């Protein structure tokens, strides 16, 4: 079978380029849920596709003459050559003008162990060892793929419904030229979001936790919002950060980066980071960007 295909040939029935997404990542991190989410959004999804068959899949899409405008392939670890096979397939497609987007799902070792134990299944790479041994082997095997992914999603703090919502936010509409931006507030005491592209620290502002009337509230409450934004340095920070974001986001758009995650942190992820994240998102939305706001640690205290 002739597997050659060019970017000009791979087009939908309405003349626009077909969207190609590769879903990969750690076993137990939610690949099946992500795939089901795309199916629900009318994507054509192929599960457990060997990386070497990606060019053939693209050729079949071309032969469909526009009937498959949005295609997703789920690829996972099948051999020790998985990483090189996938990278080789993506490079081969690139030489033909086809640029698939790679979504990488991951979670902490603790989360993955808990998920494997809950379903009482072995990790595909643990062999005669423990689940943690399989996770370590897979993480090392996928290191290069993760580094080149267009979108990295940490699912440790997401339930099934939240992961589906994230996938809907990213893929529920047609392709856009500007990056889709997620603004995530978080608490440093719970760790950095591993999928963050940029991290901003709001701990230079006074903490509303030490004000009795504000402590039980959150950054979504108007009183906390006004307090945080009125502090010395808050307005200057916002102006400077947003000015820097304009430069960075323009560069990401030129480079074809589709998804950007901005992490805004404070100590507990309840007051300052929430108020700042809301304000940053509001001002970015005014520029016409597609914005999603997630308060990762709100409610944990």
Image (spheres, rainbow, N blue to C red):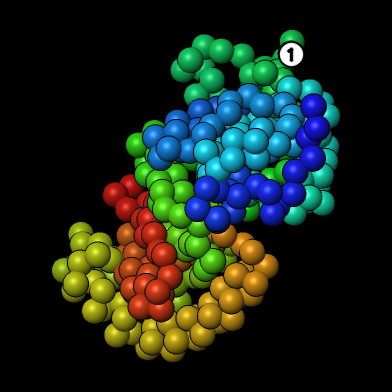
- In the image, 209 versus 259, the foreground residue is 259
- In the image, 79 versus 19, the foreground residue is 19
Q: Position of residue 111 (x, y in %)?
A: 51, 32
Above/below status of 229 relative to 100: below
The reply, left or right, for residue 118 in relation to residue 11 is left
The reply, left or right, for residue 59 in relation to residue 67 is right
The reply, left or right, for residue 8 in relation to residue 220 is right
| Furthest-left residue in this view | 213
Q: Position of residue 269 (x, y in %)?
A: 38, 59
Marker count (numbered): 1
Q: Is residue 125 visible?
A: yes
Above/below status of 260 relative to 232: above
Tell me the residue at 83%/29% (across/down).
81
Tell me the residue at 48%/15% (across/down).
119
Q: Position of residue 21 (x, y in %)?
A: 59, 43
Tell me the residue at 65%/72% (across/down).
254
- In the image, 251 versus 137, the foreground residue is 251
Above/below status of 295 relative to 209: above
Residue ID for mark 1: 127
Q: Residues within 10 Å of mark 1 (few under 14, many from 20)?
A: few
Q: Quadrant of residue 132?
A: top right
Label 1 SS:
loop
Q: Position of residue 42 (x, y in %)?
A: 43, 37
Tell me the residue at 35%/37% (across/down).
161
Considering the image in quadrants, where does the N terminus appear? top right
Q: Is residue 90 visible?
A: no
Above/below status of 277 relative to 11: below
């Amino acid at each position: 079978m002739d597997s050659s295909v060019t970017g000009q040939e791979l087009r939908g029935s309405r003349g626009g380029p077909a969207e190609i997404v590769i879903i990969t990542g750690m076993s137990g991190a939610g690949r099946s849920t992500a795939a089901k989410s795309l199916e629900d959004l009318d994507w054509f999804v192929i599960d457990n596709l060997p990386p070497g068959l990606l060019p053939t899949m693209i050729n079949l899409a071309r032969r469909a003459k526009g009937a498959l405008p949005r295609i997703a392939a789920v690829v996972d670890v099948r051999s020790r050559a998985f990483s090189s096979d996938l990278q080789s397939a993506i490079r081969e497609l690139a030489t033909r003008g086809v640029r698939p987007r790679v979504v990488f799902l991951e979670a902490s070792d603790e989360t993955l162990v808990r998920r494997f134990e809950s379903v009482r299944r072995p990790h595909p790479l643990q062999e005669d060892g423990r689940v943690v041994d399989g996770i370590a082997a897979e993480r090392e095997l996928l290191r290069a793929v993760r580094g080149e992914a267009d979108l990295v999603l940490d699912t440790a703090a997401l339930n099934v419904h939240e992961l589906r919502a994230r996938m809907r936010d990213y893929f529920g509409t047609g392709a856009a030229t500007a990056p889709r931006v997620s603004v995530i507030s978080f608490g440093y005491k719970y760790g950095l979001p591993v999928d963050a592209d940029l991290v901003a620290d709001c701990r230079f502002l006074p903490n509303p936790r030490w004000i009795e009337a504000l402590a039980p509230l959150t950054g979504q409450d108007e009183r906390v919002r006004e307090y945080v934004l009125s502090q010395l340095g808050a307005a200057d920070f916002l102006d400077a950060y947003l000015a820097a974001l304009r430069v960075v986001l323009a560069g990401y758009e030129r480079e074809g980066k589709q998804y950007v995650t901005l992490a805004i942190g404070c100590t507990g992820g309840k007051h300052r980071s929430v108020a700042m994240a809301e304000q940053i998102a509001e001002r970015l939305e005014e520029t016409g960007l597609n914005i999603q706001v997630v308060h990762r640690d709100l409610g944990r205290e």
